[in-house]
Image (cartoon, rainbow, N blue to C red):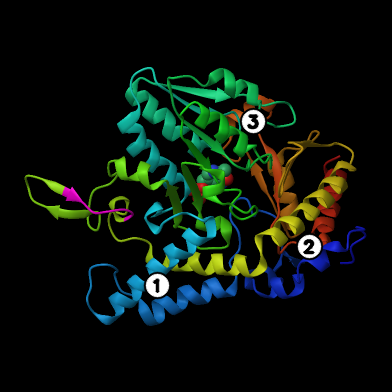
Amino acid sequence: MESNLKTNINEEILNIEKIRNDFPILKQLIHNKPLCYLDNAASTQKPQIVIDTINNFYSTTNSNIHRGVHYLSEKSTQAFENARIKVKDFINAKSEKEIIFTSGTTASINLVAQSFGRKYLNEDDEIIVTTMEHHSNIVPWQLLCDEKNANLKVVKINDIGELLLDSLNDLISEKTKLISVMHVSNTLGTINPIKEIIKIAHQNNVPVLLDAAQSIQHIEIDVQELDCDFLAFSGHKIYGPTGIGILYGKENLLDEMPPFMGGGDMISKVTFEETTFNELPFKFEAGTSNIAGAIGLGAAIDYVKSIGIENIKEYETNLLNAATDAVKEIPGIKIIGNAKEKTSVLSFVIDNIHPHDIGTFLDFEGVAIRTGHHCTQPLMDFFKIPATSRASFAFYNTLEEVEQLTIALKKTIEVFN
Ligand code: PMP
């Protein structure tokens, strides 16, 4: 399909043909149409190198880690710990001890809630989140607050989907024990002013957890420069496998926190009278980890680095701008989320057509988008809508695909009207 969109600069930023060749899944026809995969905020596709790395691990190296003295176990352990170093370098953590392998963002946030939260939260204390949070950054805190008789406070947003920082200033007090905030909204695409949030929090001696599930794949993250206290992300959203994720925490905080789960690998010595715990990061990695997942994530990080996160950001911003301009022109469509700082997510509603019908119709045109509340029901309540349709972009998407989306949307409106 020839693109009428006037932006050719993207071809200069990335070698898109080569990149698309790296992702075997993209070559498919869906319902006889070229697959136009625009559900990247839900999960990203995997480059061949990630698939090969996992395949190779199981074909040549597979063995349990840390406890074996035999060759394969040592090789496995090396590969697993090497992946930890890759993550550490990628987010510029000070030490590998600050990198905990979990099963994903959700598990990472629950770890902080159940370990840090249980230790430091008392009756009437407060945790601050925002209106736009994903359920996985709301429910763990509700569970904790219920248990501790503590309270969840919510930073408000404006109609274009930006945080109202004044509201944070009003909420924060000596009762605040943690601010847990998303870096980028999975529903609106808003990039939150996290540097300012962290500054305000630290002026009040409050630590900050960043949910980086939607930013790690789009924006350069340097945890030392940001000075965030915890950071959570999922492997599957950064071109790595499912079932693996990261909790970064400052060493002094993690050191003081009690273990979250008990079991093998996280102990130093066990007797029936008493157990002492392993050092960081193993204290938080009970049981056999997702070894292949961690190694696959390491390969995904290498791949992203080879393309360059700055190039990715520039390319995706151009795609989002082109898509926003094109979709805005279609009568009957309203974009939800018009923040000044946005990345890679375009949410919208169409007069008189339910998002699920839009999603189903688009699927027949080969276009995969997501429809629903996107695990942000309080945000849907704020906008007084039950659901949106969401197109979300990755660096393997093209301007031609933006056009495929807009043509399919126009067709949908024609058919339903
Ligand atoms: N936070 C945000 C902002 C997300 O977009 C998601 C995934 N949609 C999550 C948390 C949860 O991630 P996971 O399901 O991989 O744990």
Using residue 349 as the reference point, say whether residue 326 is left or right of it: right
Which residue has dot 3 on it?
A: 380
Task: Measuring from the top left, give residue 345's x and y in whole percent.
Answer: 70, 46
Query: Is residue 411 in view from this perspective?
Result: yes
Q: Tell me the amino acid under the disc marked 1.
A: Ala
Residue positioned 56% across, 47% down in the render: 225
Image quadrant where one finds the N terminus: bottom right
In this view, the mark in front (1 or 3): 1
- Provide the secondary structure element on which disc 2 rests: loop
User: Residue 288: which numbered mark, if any?
Assistant: none
Q: Residues within 10 Å of mark 3 (few under 14, many from 20)?
A: many
Q: What amino acid is found at the position of numbered circle 2 in the picture?
A: Thr
Residue 64 quadrant: bottom left
**Residue picked out by circle 1:** 79
Q: Residue at x 66, y 25 (%)?
A: 164
- Disc 1 to disc 3, how far (Cα)? 43 Å
